[in-house]
Image (tube, helix red, strand yellow):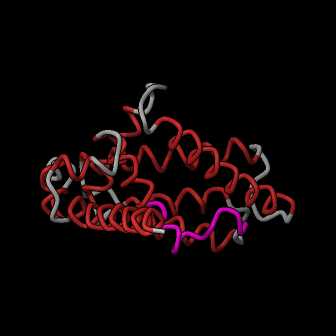
Amino acid sequence: MAQRGAYAKGVAKREEILERALEVIAREGYRGASVKELADAVGLSQAGLLHYFDSKDELFTAIIRKRDEVDSRRFGDVDQDPSPDRLRDGFVGIVRHNAEVPGLVQLFSRLAVEAGDTEHPAHAYFVERSALLREMFARSFARQQQGDELTDRVDPETLARIVQAVSDGLQLQWLQDQTVDMPATMDALFALLARD
């Protein structure tokens, strides 16, 4: 019984670490969020913090997963197959929110590049996340094409990949020039795809 209680406490502490890390990185940025600073935010030593994660890379991957979990409350659950309007509005809402948390966008972008290495702890996360995002958009685009609401000049899977590429590219542009209006640009892309 004691082991079950210790496990529950460990899970709760890991969740606390991730939630506080989201706050610290959003506030201080990726560069300002050292393992020491994250450990201080939850009252642990660096070694104590890393007890809950296999490595710094795994910690940062878990932070991005937690960010997705928090954001999905607005974006909608992938398994629920949201309506096209809800999907678009939710996605643009997340893009809008990203402009408020540059540190998390920095972290996401850095990890996305590093995860190109198949040995990186974030590799599987990015492969799965990308596939789920494209699948959700492709299903929505297929329904819209069947209803003659969306251009059918490009297949739904390719359209989904284009949306993902534009979103990821906009984040990089925005990190270099924060006058880039990410949500307006995403809205413009969706408008281009719609039938008149």
Q: Position of residue 172 (x, y in %)?
A: 34, 44
Q: Is residue 151 left or right of residue 70?
A: right
Q: Position of residue 66 (x, y in %)?
A: 42, 60
Asked if the magenta segment contains residue 72, the reply would be yes
The structure residue drawn at horizontal position 15% and vertical position 59%, both measured from the top left corner, is 28
Q: Is residue 43 left or right of residue 97?
A: left
Asked if the magenta segment contains residue 75, the reply would be yes
Q: Is residue 188 visible?
A: yes
The structure residue drawn at horizontal position 31% and vertical position 39%, both measured from the top left corner, is 55
Q: Position of residue 1 (x, y in %)?
A: 49, 69
Q: Main secondary structure of the magenta part?
A: helix
For the residue pair 15 and 78, the one nearer the viewer reads as 15
Q: Is residue 183 visible?
A: no
144 is higher (above) or lower (below) than 155: below
Res 95 quadrant in image: bottom left
Question: Seen from this angle, which residue lies furthest front?
Answer: 1
The structure residue drawn at horizontal position 38% and vertical position 33%, both measured from the top left corner, is 113
125 is higher (above) or lower (below) than 79: above
**Quadrant placement of the C terminus:** bottom right
Q: Magenta segment, which residues?
A: 68-81
Res 3 quadrant in image: bottom left
